Image: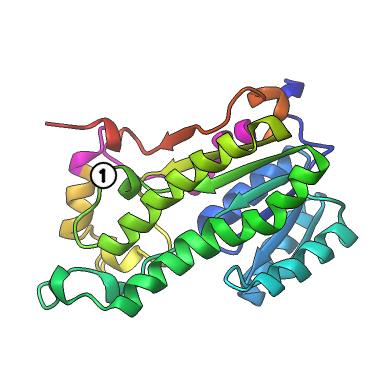
Amino acid sequence: MDIFDLSNEIAVVLGAGGALGGAMAEGLAEAGAGVAILDFAVERGQARAKSIADKGRRAVFVQANALDRASLRAAHEAVTRELGAPTILVNAVGGNDPAAQVTEDRSFENLSAEAWRANFDLNLCGGVLFPCQEFGAAMVKRGRGSIINIASVSAHIPLSRVVAYSAAKAAVLNLTRFLAREWATKGVRVNSITPGFFPADQNRRLLFNADGSPTPRAKAILDHTPMRRMGEPSELIGAVIFLASDKASGFVTGADIRVDGGFLAQTI
């Protein structure tokens, strides 16, 4: 199965200190790629790099702020110096600003413009635009690369409450397809993965009560998921390795792989 061998690749994973980005970074390393762990949080980024290195795989941690172009440029230079020129980019930076959620006390009409912009800055600009301008542009110059953006089920069907996050993630899908078309003849493939619901630090309080029981929102999610469970971060690894490998997915660009337990297939 050498089509999944990434031994000659250098992967940059932005947001690799988090649960989902970290799992994908671990998977890319297991497939043989040298992996650069990029995260703003030093401790968790270093811990992820150490976890990979302890298994005998190549990994370095580089602190980076995805919202700062100068920081990304410095990180790019550091990765190239430590591991080599990146050939894979996984953009796993993102999250929801609760101030841009519709709640019982905050209607859509009263949403803060600042909070709305913060969601777009994080999920669209830091999550895709700036990293693609920095790392993707270099891939275009070299004529080779695979970019994998992380979307959301809310990009396909806007979820209740998280209106700004849903809109920003829909823009992620749109920008992914634009870049796929723009760079298709330049050797750079651009695709996305849509995770379903994966418990992580940032959403755990929305999904589980203090005693570990599911919240009403989590119950609604499970009722709408044909597999009747939430995902494990390791279940994203197969999709990211497939999209990262030119041998496995060389004719795949502009695609979105849903890893959601059937959530988006469910109707009534």
Relative to 18, say whether 195 is above or below. above
Q: For the magenta stretch, what is the residue range?
A: 223-243
Tell me which secondary structure the magenta stretch mostly adopts. helix
Quadrant where the image shows the N terminus: top right
Q: Residue at x 41, y 65 (%)?
A: 120
Relative to 255, say whether 96 is above or below. below
Left or right: 109, with 236 as reference point:
left
List x then y, in percent, for residue 246: 71, 28
Q: Which residue is mark 1?
A: 157
The front one of 32 and 133 is 133
Q: Residue at x 67, y 25 (%)?
A: 250
| SS state under label 1 | loop
Q: Is residue 237 magenta?
A: yes
The front one of 248 and 179 is 179
The front one of 69 and 263 is 69
List x then y, in percent, for residue 258: 42, 35
Amino acid bearing label 1: Ile
Quadrant where the image shows the C terminus: top left
- Neighbours of disc 1 within 10 Å: few (<14), some (14-19), many (20+): few
